[in-house]
Amino acid sequence: MKTVTLMTHSAENTEALGVYLARRLKGGDVLGLTGDLGAGKTTLVRGLASGLGLDTAQVKSPTYVLMHEYPGEIPVIHMDAYRLEGAGEVNALDVDLMFHPHKVTIIEWAKNCEAIMPQQTVWIHLDYQDGDQRNIVFEAQHARAQDIVQYMESFEK
Ligand SMILES: Nc1ncnc2c1ncn2[C@@H]1O[C@H](COP(=O)(O)OP(=O)(O)OP(=O)(O)O)[C@@H](O)[C@H]1O
Ligand SMILES: [Mg+2]
């Protein structure tokens, strides 16, 4: 298990972290985001989309439609598992659509579908601190995911 803990001090700072992380991503990478309502998951996704050269105006929490796809050189699957309930709903998800080798997959509330999250998932836990501060913990087990986590150690705020 490889873990890196960072702190951001504003929404812009979290977006910048997303831009930085995006530079390291390639097709097949999977990010599993956890953290309470308003912790900054979608803010991070906006930074990631921007860093991948996608249109960030499209990025919204896909709470009501479950999944969005943003087209681009590396397309992004953006999913929100907030509303998923129980193993039946999780097992009904189309994993071939969600985890595509040519796309980056980002899942908010990924704990809700932990059973289907692939081994190479980079887990990103966002936590409220005082005011606009957020604690962001990166966690990985798989070698490729550990590389990504290691790289995040060099993020300069
Ligand atoms: N350091 C920070 N990082 C991220 N967002 C911050 C930070 N400080 C303040 N904010 C604010 O917190 C809110 C984060 O909202 P966001 O939609 O990104 O959360 P979320 O985790 O996706 O929530 P939900 O689970 O409801 O989808 C925004 O209003 C953002 O401006
Ligand atoms: Mg969100």
Image (cartoon, rainbow, N blue to C red):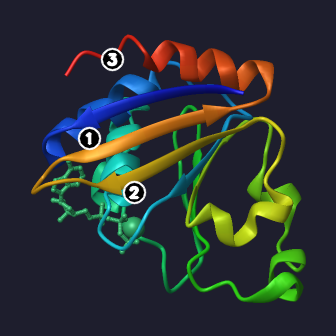
Tell me the amino acid under the disc marked 1: Thr
Picture coordinates of residue 118, whole percent (x, y): 83, 46
Asked if 48 appears above or below 144 in the picture, the reply is below
The residue positioned 48% from the left and 74% from the top of the image is 62
Asked if 59 appears above or below 48 in the picture, the reply is below
Secondary structure of the residue carrying numbered label 2: helix
- Say which residue label 1 marks: 14
Q: Distance from label 1 to label 3 (Cα)?
A: 11 Å
Q: Evaluate if marks 3 and 2 touch, with contact meaning CB atoms under 8 Å apart.
A: no
The residue positioned 36% from the left and 35% from the top of the image is 18
Picture coordinates of residue 82, whole percent (x, y): 56, 78
Q: Mark 1 or mark 2, which is nearer the start of the sequence?
A: 1
Q: Distance from label 3 to label 2 (Cα)?
A: 18 Å
- Say which residue label 2 marks: 41
Q: Along the line of sight, which residue is nearer the eye, 35 or 74?
A: 35
The residue positioned 36% from the left and 47% from the top of the image is 44
Tell me the amino acid under the disc marked 3: Phe
Q: Mark 3 or mark 1, which is nearer the start of the sequence?
A: 1
- Say which residue label 3 marks: 155
Quadrant of the picture in which ligand 2 is shown: bottom left
Asked if 52 appears above or below 106 in the picture, the reply is above
Q: Is residue 62 left or right of residue 131?
A: right
Check residue 88 in the rendering and tell me which mark sits there, or answer none.
Answer: none
Tell me the amino acid under the disc marked 2: Lys
Ligand 1 lies under 8 Å from the Cβ of mark 1 = yes
At label 3, counting other C-alpha atoms closer than 10 Å, the crowd grade (few under 14, some 14-19, many 20 or more) is few
Q: Along the line of sight, which residue is nearer the eye, 46 or 131?
A: 131
